Image: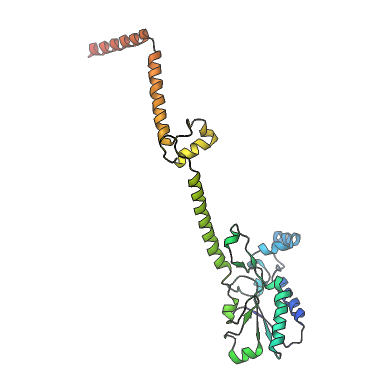
């Protein structure tokens, strides 16, 4: 048997009394132990919903019961006895409606809300119902359990499992994240500049060079790609060399030539 709390009702309690019991189980599952960390206690006292961010390992119920192996608080089973199917159906309807705050999962808070259909069961009490007559006739391991929020009867294991829970969430989140990265990459490529001279798309390095302030001032013609920019730099350097050569006086060139000749003659004499 999985870890589970059991309430046997012989129709001696009103359906709303069972809702109250469910609420108390839910509240108990949110308590901290007496020796809880002071910082955690102060946080929970200052903001009641903060308990939802406290791991179950740090809560009181985990001092009493082993982990369930599933999301959520300790499961609760209502076993009805000595009653009719109609009365059971009416009671379950009240539990589902009035007790929704305590048993129902909620939506995950995700950046990919539209892509996530998984439900967050971590703060809920999983509630299953059956009758003593069904248990007597078929046994506890038969498909005699109905989980609140679902239709039909299942085995206890299947009823307590959450195929729409955290495992599905991780898979959907991963798919949505991969799709988002793919979409962003497509959008980025659509925005990548093209060279106005050769038509080639800019490399990442050239794109960054023309857009980052500290490098943009030295990027030259921002409408051309890196290769064309290299050609421009080479042309500018060649033009500068020609300009410097043209600006050098002839006598200075002759003097340089004579000095070079003297040096060559000196080296010859020494040889």
Closer-to-camera residue (130/224): 224
In the displayed structure image, the side of residue 20 where residue 110 appears, left or right: left
**Quarter of the image that includes the C terminus:** top left
- Residue for point 50% across, 44% down: 191
Residue 266: x and y in percent read: 27, 11
Residue 116: x and y in percent read: 58, 63
Give the residue at the far top of this rendering. 251
Rendering quarter of residue 101: bottom right
User: Looking at the image, can residue 8 be seen?
Assistant: no
- Residue for point 59% across, 78% down: 159
User: Looking at the image, can residue 207 be seen?
Assistant: yes
**Quarter of the image that includes the N terminus:** bottom right
Closer-to-camera residue (55/126): 126
Rendering quarter of residue 38: bottom right
Residue 64: x and y in percent read: 66, 75
Residue 224: x and y in percent read: 45, 34
């Amino acid at each position: 048997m999985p870890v589970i709390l059991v309430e046997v009702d012989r129709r001696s309690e009103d359906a709303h009394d069972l809702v109250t019991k469910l609420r108390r189980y839910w509240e108990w599952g949110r308590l901290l132990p007496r020796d809880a960390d002071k910082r955690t206690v102060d946080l929970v006292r200052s903001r009641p919903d903060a308990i939802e961010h406290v791991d179950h390992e740090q809560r009181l119920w985990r001092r009493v019961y082993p982990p369930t192996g599933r999301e959520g608080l300790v499961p609760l089973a209502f076993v009805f006895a000595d009653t009719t199917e109609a009365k059971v159906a009416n009671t379950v309807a009240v539990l589902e409606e009035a007790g929704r705050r305590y048993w129902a999962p909620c939506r995950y808070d995700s950046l990919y809300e539209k892509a996530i259909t998984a439900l967050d069961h971590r703060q809920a009490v999983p509630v299953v119902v059956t009758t003593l007559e069904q248990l007597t006739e078929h046994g506890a391991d038969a498909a005699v359990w109905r989980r609140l929020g679902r239709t039909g009867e299942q085995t206890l294991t299947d009823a307590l499992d959450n195929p729409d829970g955290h495992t599905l969430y991780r898979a959907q989140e991963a798919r949505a994240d991969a799709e988002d990265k793919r979409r962003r990459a497509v959008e980025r490529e659509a925005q990548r500049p093209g060279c106005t001279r050769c038509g080639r798309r800019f490399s990442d390095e050239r794109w960054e060079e023309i857009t980052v302030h500290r490098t943009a001032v030295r990027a030259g013609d921002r409408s051309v790609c890196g290769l064309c920019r290299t050609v421009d730099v080479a042309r500018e350097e060649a033009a500068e060399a020609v300009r410097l050569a043209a600006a050098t006086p002839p006598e200075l060139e002759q003097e340089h030539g004579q000095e070079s000749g003297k040096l060559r003659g000196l080296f010859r004499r020494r040889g």
